[in-house]
Image (cartoon, rainbow, N blue to C red):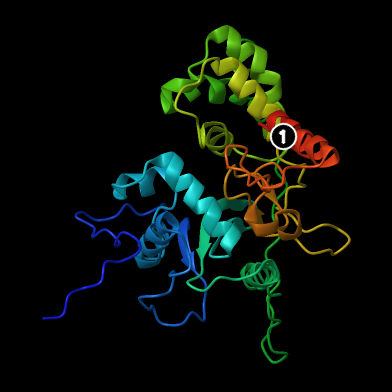
Amino acid sequence: MATKQPSPAPSTPALSRPYPMANPGYGKRSVPGQPAARADDFALLPARERYVAGFIDHLPDGAAMDVKSLAKQLPLYGQQAVGSALKALSVAGYLRRVRCLVGEGEQVRWVFRTFWSRTARDNEWWGSHLAAGERETAPVVAAPAAPPSWIPVEEPPATPAVPQQRTPEPAPTPADAPSPAYLALAQLGRTDPRLALSAADCAVLEARAAEWLARGVTTDYLTQALTAGLPPQVGSPVGFVRRRLDDKIPPRVTPAVVPPASGGPVHRTMMECTKCGVPGRPEALPDGLCRSCGLPDPSAPVDLPVSGLAESEVHARAGHVRELLRSR
Protein backbone atom coordinates (compact mmCIF):
# COMPACT_ATOMS: atom_id res chain seq x y z
CA MET A 1 0.00 0.00 0.00
CA ALA A 2 1.46 3.32 -1.06
CA THR A 3 1.99 5.90 1.65
CA LYS A 4 1.55 9.62 1.20
CA GLN A 5 4.67 11.73 1.37
CA PRO A 6 4.37 14.54 3.92
CA SER A 7 4.03 18.01 2.41
CA PRO A 8 6.94 20.40 3.06
CA ALA A 9 4.41 23.08 4.05
CA PRO A 10 1.05 22.99 5.86
CA SER A 11 -1.87 22.36 3.58
CA THR A 12 -4.19 25.22 2.70
CA PRO A 13 -6.96 25.41 5.33
CA ALA A 14 -10.51 24.64 4.28
CA LEU A 15 -12.98 27.46 4.84
CA SER A 16 -15.50 26.46 7.50
CA ARG A 17 -17.56 29.59 6.90
CA PRO A 18 -17.88 32.09 4.05
CA TYR A 19 -14.77 34.23 3.74
CA PRO A 20 -15.47 37.96 4.25
CA MET A 21 -15.70 39.96 1.06
CA ALA A 22 -14.42 43.52 0.76
CA ASN A 23 -16.63 46.47 -0.12
CA PRO A 24 -17.60 46.65 -3.82
CA GLY A 25 -14.57 47.72 -5.86
CA TYR A 26 -12.04 46.74 -3.17
CA GLY A 27 -10.20 43.52 -2.29
CA LYS A 28 -8.39 40.89 -4.33
CA ARG A 29 -7.94 41.26 -8.10
CA SER A 30 -6.40 38.41 -10.10
CA VAL A 31 -4.23 39.50 -13.03
CA PRO A 32 -5.29 38.16 -16.45
CA GLY A 33 -3.50 35.48 -18.44
CA GLN A 34 -2.57 33.20 -15.56
CA PRO A 35 -1.95 29.48 -16.09
CA ALA A 36 -4.16 26.89 -14.44
CA ALA A 37 -3.51 26.22 -10.76
CA ARG A 38 -1.03 23.44 -10.00
CA ALA A 39 0.02 21.69 -6.82
CA ASP A 40 3.61 22.98 -7.10
CA ASP A 41 2.80 26.62 -7.89
CA PHE A 42 4.50 27.90 -4.73
CA ALA A 43 6.91 25.02 -4.09
CA LEU A 44 9.98 27.28 -3.99
CA LEU A 45 8.60 29.49 -1.20
CA PRO A 46 9.28 28.93 2.52
CA ALA A 47 6.62 27.04 4.46
CA ARG A 48 4.84 30.07 5.90
CA GLU A 49 4.75 32.02 2.63
CA ARG A 50 3.66 28.91 0.72
CA TYR A 51 0.82 28.39 3.19
CA VAL A 52 -0.42 31.99 2.92
CA ALA A 53 0.04 32.11 -0.88
CA GLY A 54 -1.97 28.91 -1.36
CA PHE A 55 -4.78 30.33 0.75
CA ILE A 56 -4.87 33.66 -1.11
CA ASP A 57 -4.75 31.91 -4.48
CA HIS A 58 -7.99 30.05 -3.68
CA LEU A 59 -9.85 33.21 -2.62
CA PRO A 60 -12.34 34.71 -5.10
CA ASP A 61 -11.86 38.15 -6.58
CA GLY A 62 -13.22 40.80 -4.27
CA ALA A 63 -12.21 38.95 -1.09
CA ALA A 64 -10.92 41.06 1.79
CA MET A 65 -7.11 41.18 1.76
CA ASP A 66 -6.33 43.10 4.94
CA VAL A 67 -4.09 41.45 7.52
CA LYS A 68 -6.81 41.09 10.16
CA SER A 69 -9.23 39.27 7.84
CA LEU A 70 -6.53 36.90 6.61
CA ALA A 71 -5.23 36.15 10.11
CA LYS A 72 -8.72 35.23 11.33
CA GLN A 73 -8.88 32.48 8.72
CA LEU A 74 -5.30 31.19 9.10
CA PRO A 75 -5.09 29.30 12.42
CA LEU A 76 -1.31 28.76 12.29
CA TYR A 77 -0.24 32.40 12.10
CA GLY A 78 -1.16 35.71 13.73
CA GLN A 79 -1.41 39.18 12.24
CA GLN A 80 2.30 39.94 12.52
CA ALA A 81 3.28 36.69 10.78
CA VAL A 82 0.67 37.22 8.04
CA GLY A 83 1.93 40.78 7.49
CA SER A 84 5.50 39.51 7.16
CA ALA A 85 4.35 36.83 4.71
CA LEU A 86 2.55 39.41 2.56
CA LYS A 87 5.72 41.51 2.48
CA ALA A 88 7.74 38.46 1.39
CA LEU A 89 5.17 37.61 -1.31
CA SER A 90 5.39 41.18 -2.59
CA VAL A 91 9.19 40.96 -2.80
CA ALA A 92 8.86 37.59 -4.57
CA GLY A 93 6.58 39.21 -7.18
CA TYR A 94 3.23 37.60 -6.40
CA LEU A 95 1.22 40.64 -5.30
CA ARG A 96 1.02 44.42 -5.35
CA ARG A 97 -1.22 46.71 -3.31
CA VAL A 98 -2.77 49.47 -5.42
CA ARG A 99 -5.19 52.35 -5.02
CA CYS A 100 -7.39 53.19 -8.04
CA LEU A 101 -9.40 56.30 -8.82
CA VAL A 102 -12.90 55.33 -9.97
CA GLY A 103 -15.83 57.45 -11.08
CA GLU A 104 -16.15 60.49 -13.28
CA GLY A 105 -16.37 64.22 -12.79
CA GLU A 106 -16.91 65.17 -9.18
CA GLN A 107 -18.17 61.70 -8.24
CA VAL A 108 -14.78 60.07 -7.83
CA ARG A 109 -13.22 58.10 -4.98
CA TRP A 110 -10.14 56.03 -4.26
CA VAL A 111 -10.55 52.27 -3.88
CA PHE A 112 -7.85 49.96 -2.51
CA ARG A 113 -7.09 46.65 -4.23
CA THR A 114 -4.52 43.86 -4.00
CA PHE A 115 -3.49 42.49 -7.39
CA TRP A 116 -2.51 38.83 -7.25
CA SER A 117 -0.52 36.74 -9.72
CA ARG A 118 -0.11 32.98 -9.42
CA THR A 119 3.17 33.39 -11.31
CA ALA A 120 5.92 35.54 -9.81
CA ARG A 121 6.47 38.75 -11.84
CA ASP A 122 9.31 41.27 -11.82
CA ASN A 123 9.02 45.00 -11.20
CA GLU A 124 8.96 45.86 -14.92
CA TRP A 125 6.00 43.54 -15.51
CA TRP A 126 4.04 44.99 -12.63
CA GLY A 127 4.76 48.53 -13.78
CA SER A 128 3.56 47.76 -17.32
CA HIS A 129 0.48 45.93 -16.06
CA LEU A 130 -0.59 48.79 -13.79
CA ALA A 131 0.05 51.33 -16.55
CA ALA A 132 -2.11 49.29 -18.95
CA GLY A 133 -4.85 49.05 -16.33
CA GLU A 134 -4.68 52.80 -15.83
CA ARG A 135 -5.30 53.39 -19.53
CA GLU A 136 -8.24 50.98 -19.52
CA THR A 137 -9.91 52.56 -16.48
CA ALA A 138 -9.51 56.16 -17.67
CA PRO A 139 -12.96 57.61 -18.42
CA VAL A 140 -13.72 58.43 -22.05
CA VAL A 141 -16.09 61.37 -22.48
CA ALA A 142 -17.77 61.26 -25.89
CA ALA A 143 -19.00 64.48 -27.48
CA PRO A 144 -22.77 64.58 -28.14
CA ALA A 145 -23.59 63.62 -31.70
CA ALA A 146 -24.96 66.39 -33.87
CA PRO A 147 -28.47 65.78 -35.27
CA PRO A 148 -28.77 65.02 -39.00
CA SER A 149 -29.15 68.03 -41.26
CA TRP A 150 -32.62 66.98 -42.41
CA ILE A 151 -34.05 67.13 -38.88
CA PRO A 152 -35.34 70.61 -38.01
CA VAL A 153 -33.91 71.98 -34.82
CA GLU A 154 -36.38 73.82 -32.64
CA GLU A 155 -35.20 76.86 -30.80
CA PRO A 156 -35.81 76.61 -27.04
CA PRO A 157 -38.40 79.03 -25.72
CA ALA A 158 -37.05 82.19 -24.21
CA THR A 159 -36.81 82.05 -20.45
CA PRO A 160 -38.45 85.02 -18.75
CA ALA A 161 -36.13 87.12 -16.68
CA VAL A 162 -36.46 86.41 -12.97
CA PRO A 163 -35.04 88.70 -10.33
CA GLN A 164 -32.07 87.17 -8.57
CA GLN A 165 -33.13 85.48 -5.37
CA ARG A 166 -31.18 85.68 -2.17
CA THR A 167 -29.76 82.32 -1.14
CA PRO A 168 -29.74 81.50 2.55
CA GLU A 169 -26.32 81.77 4.10
CA PRO A 170 -24.86 78.52 5.44
CA ALA A 171 -25.07 78.02 9.14
CA PRO A 172 -21.86 79.06 10.87
CA THR A 173 -19.61 76.28 12.07
CA PRO A 174 -18.98 76.31 15.81
CA ALA A 175 -15.51 77.63 16.53
CA ASP A 176 -14.81 74.80 18.95
CA ALA A 177 -15.85 71.98 16.56
CA PRO A 178 -13.06 69.37 16.33
CA SER A 179 -11.24 69.07 13.01
CA PRO A 180 -11.26 65.83 10.94
CA ALA A 181 -7.63 65.27 11.92
CA TYR A 182 -8.47 65.55 15.63
CA LEU A 183 -11.44 63.17 15.26
CA ALA A 184 -9.30 60.61 13.39
CA LEU A 185 -6.74 60.65 16.21
CA ALA A 186 -9.46 60.39 18.85
CA GLN A 187 -10.86 57.29 17.14
CA LEU A 188 -7.53 55.42 17.16
CA GLY A 189 -8.15 54.01 20.63
CA ARG A 190 -11.47 52.54 19.52
CA THR A 191 -9.84 50.96 16.47
CA ASP A 192 -6.99 49.51 18.55
CA PRO A 193 -6.75 50.01 22.35
CA ARG A 194 -2.94 50.07 22.10
CA LEU A 195 -3.16 53.54 20.52
CA ALA A 196 -5.59 55.15 22.95
CA LEU A 197 -4.81 58.89 23.07
CA SER A 198 -5.92 61.52 25.55
CA ALA A 199 -7.47 64.85 24.57
CA ALA A 200 -4.13 66.56 25.19
CA ASP A 201 -2.34 63.98 23.01
CA CYS A 202 -4.78 64.58 20.15
CA ALA A 203 -4.29 68.33 20.41
CA VAL A 204 -0.49 67.92 20.24
CA LEU A 205 -0.63 65.63 17.19
CA GLU A 206 -3.49 67.39 15.38
CA ALA A 207 -1.25 69.55 13.17
CA ARG A 208 0.78 66.53 12.03
CA ALA A 209 -2.37 64.55 11.17
CA ALA A 210 -3.83 67.58 9.35
CA GLU A 211 -0.73 67.62 7.12
CA TRP A 212 -1.60 64.05 6.01
CA LEU A 213 -5.13 65.10 5.08
CA ALA A 214 -3.78 68.14 3.26
CA ARG A 215 -1.84 65.77 1.02
CA GLY A 216 -5.01 64.12 -0.28
CA VAL A 217 -5.44 61.06 1.95
CA THR A 218 -8.68 60.21 3.73
CA THR A 219 -9.19 59.73 7.45
CA ASP A 220 -9.74 56.00 6.83
CA TYR A 221 -6.34 55.81 5.12
CA LEU A 222 -4.73 57.75 7.99
CA THR A 223 -6.22 55.33 10.53
CA GLN A 224 -5.07 52.29 8.56
CA ALA A 225 -1.51 53.63 8.21
CA LEU A 226 -1.24 54.35 11.94
CA THR A 227 -2.68 51.04 13.14
CA ALA A 228 -1.11 48.62 10.63
CA GLY A 229 1.50 46.19 11.95
CA LEU A 230 1.48 47.29 15.59
CA PRO A 231 3.91 45.63 18.01
CA PRO A 232 2.42 43.46 20.78
CA GLN A 233 2.77 46.32 23.29
CA VAL A 234 2.97 50.09 22.79
CA GLY A 235 4.57 51.77 25.80
CA SER A 236 3.87 55.37 24.75
CA PRO A 237 0.93 55.71 22.31
CA VAL A 238 1.52 59.43 21.75
CA GLY A 239 5.22 58.88 21.01
CA PHE A 240 4.48 55.93 18.73
CA VAL A 241 1.82 57.86 16.75
CA ARG A 242 4.07 60.94 16.51
CA ARG A 243 6.86 58.81 15.07
CA ARG A 244 4.58 57.21 12.47
CA LEU A 245 3.07 60.55 11.49
CA ASP A 246 6.58 61.90 10.85
CA ASP A 247 8.18 58.83 9.25
CA LYS A 248 5.35 57.60 7.02
CA ILE A 249 3.81 60.84 5.82
CA PRO A 250 2.70 60.33 2.17
CA PRO A 251 4.13 62.42 -0.66
CA ARG A 252 2.30 65.44 -1.98
CA VAL A 253 0.01 64.30 -4.78
CA THR A 254 -2.07 66.67 -6.87
CA PRO A 255 -5.74 65.57 -6.76
CA ALA A 256 -6.52 63.78 -10.02
CA VAL A 257 -10.20 64.73 -10.19
CA VAL A 258 -9.98 67.12 -13.15
CA PRO A 259 -7.46 66.61 -15.99
CA PRO A 260 -4.76 69.28 -15.98
CA ALA A 261 -5.10 72.17 -18.41
CA SER A 262 -1.90 71.15 -20.20
CA GLY A 263 -3.52 67.91 -21.35
CA GLY A 264 -1.13 65.70 -19.36
CA PRO A 265 -2.18 62.23 -18.21
CA VAL A 266 -4.18 61.74 -15.02
CA HIS A 267 -2.79 58.96 -12.82
CA ARG A 268 -5.81 56.86 -11.89
CA THR A 269 -3.75 53.98 -10.48
CA MET A 270 -1.18 54.35 -7.71
CA MET A 271 0.81 51.57 -6.07
CA GLU A 272 1.09 51.31 -2.29
CA CYS A 273 3.79 49.90 -0.03
CA THR A 274 2.65 46.38 0.88
CA LYS A 275 3.73 46.83 4.51
CA CYS A 276 2.90 50.42 5.54
CA GLY A 277 0.53 51.60 2.76
CA VAL A 278 2.51 54.68 1.66
CA PRO A 279 1.43 55.53 -1.93
CA GLY A 280 3.85 56.12 -4.80
CA ARG A 281 4.63 55.39 -8.42
CA PRO A 282 5.87 51.85 -9.25
CA GLU A 283 9.45 53.03 -9.83
CA ALA A 284 9.52 54.49 -6.30
CA LEU A 285 8.35 51.21 -4.72
CA PRO A 286 10.66 48.41 -5.94
CA ASP A 287 9.29 45.00 -4.95
CA GLY A 288 6.14 46.81 -3.77
CA LEU A 289 7.94 48.32 -0.74
CA CYS A 290 8.96 51.85 0.19
CA ARG A 291 12.55 52.61 1.13
CA SER A 292 11.97 52.30 4.88
CA CYS A 293 10.08 49.00 4.70
CA GLY A 294 12.54 47.58 2.15
CA LEU A 295 15.45 47.74 4.60
CA PRO A 296 16.69 44.39 5.90
CA ASP A 297 15.11 43.06 9.09
CA PRO A 298 17.50 43.94 11.95
CA SER A 299 16.38 40.83 13.85
CA ALA A 300 17.55 38.53 11.05
CA PRO A 301 20.73 36.56 11.85
CA VAL A 302 23.94 37.72 10.19
CA ASP A 303 26.28 35.05 8.85
CA LEU A 304 29.86 35.77 9.89
CA PRO A 305 32.83 34.24 8.07
CA VAL A 306 34.78 31.57 9.92
CA SER A 307 38.05 33.47 9.55
CA GLY A 308 36.66 36.59 11.24
CA LEU A 309 36.20 40.14 9.91
CA ALA A 310 38.69 42.77 8.96
CA GLU A 311 38.61 46.06 10.90
CA SER A 312 37.12 47.94 7.94
CA GLU A 313 34.33 45.36 7.61
CA VAL A 314 33.56 45.63 11.33
CA HIS A 315 33.12 49.41 11.01
CA ALA A 316 30.94 48.98 7.90
CA ARG A 317 28.66 46.44 9.59
CA ALA A 318 28.40 48.59 12.72
CA GLY A 319 27.35 51.56 10.61
CA HIS A 320 24.73 49.41 8.86
CA VAL A 321 23.31 48.29 12.22
CA ARG A 322 23.13 51.90 13.45
CA GLU A 323 21.22 52.86 10.29
CA LEU A 324 18.72 50.05 10.88
CA LEU A 325 18.17 51.13 14.49
CA ARG A 326 17.56 54.73 13.43
CA SER A 327 14.99 53.62 10.83
CA ARG A 328 12.86 51.73 13.36
Residue 70: x %, y % from top left: 37, 49
The amino acid type found where label 1 is placed reads Val
Does 221 appear above or below 19? above
- Residue nearer the viewer, 52 or 132: 52
- Judged left or right of residue 323, residue 14 is left
Quarter of the rendering containing residue 41: bottom left
Residue receiving disc 1:
321
Residue 321: x %, y % from top left: 72, 34
- Judged left or right of residue 4, residue 313 is right
Q: Quadrant of the C terminus?
A: top right
- Residue nearer the viewer, 66 or 300: 300
Residue occupying the far bottom of the picture: 150
Quarter of the rendering containing residue 315: top right
Residue 249: x %, y % from top left: 70, 35
- Judged left or right of residue 281, residue 42 is left
Residue lying at 41% horizontally and 54% vertically, measured from the top left: 48
Residue lying at 30% horizontally and 61% vertically, measured from the top left: 12
- Residue nearer the viewer, 35 or 168: 35
Does 323 appear above or below 282? above
Number of other residues with Cα within 10 Å of mark 1, as a class: few under 14, some 14 to 19, many 20 or more: some
**In this rendering, does residue 177 appear at all?**
no
Residue occupying the far top of the picture: 200
**In this rendering, does residue 122 appear at all?**
yes
Residue occupying the far left of the picture: 1
Residue lying at 68% horizontally and 35% vertically, measured from the top left: 248
- Judged left or right of residue 30, residue 255 is right
Does 226 appear above or below 185? below
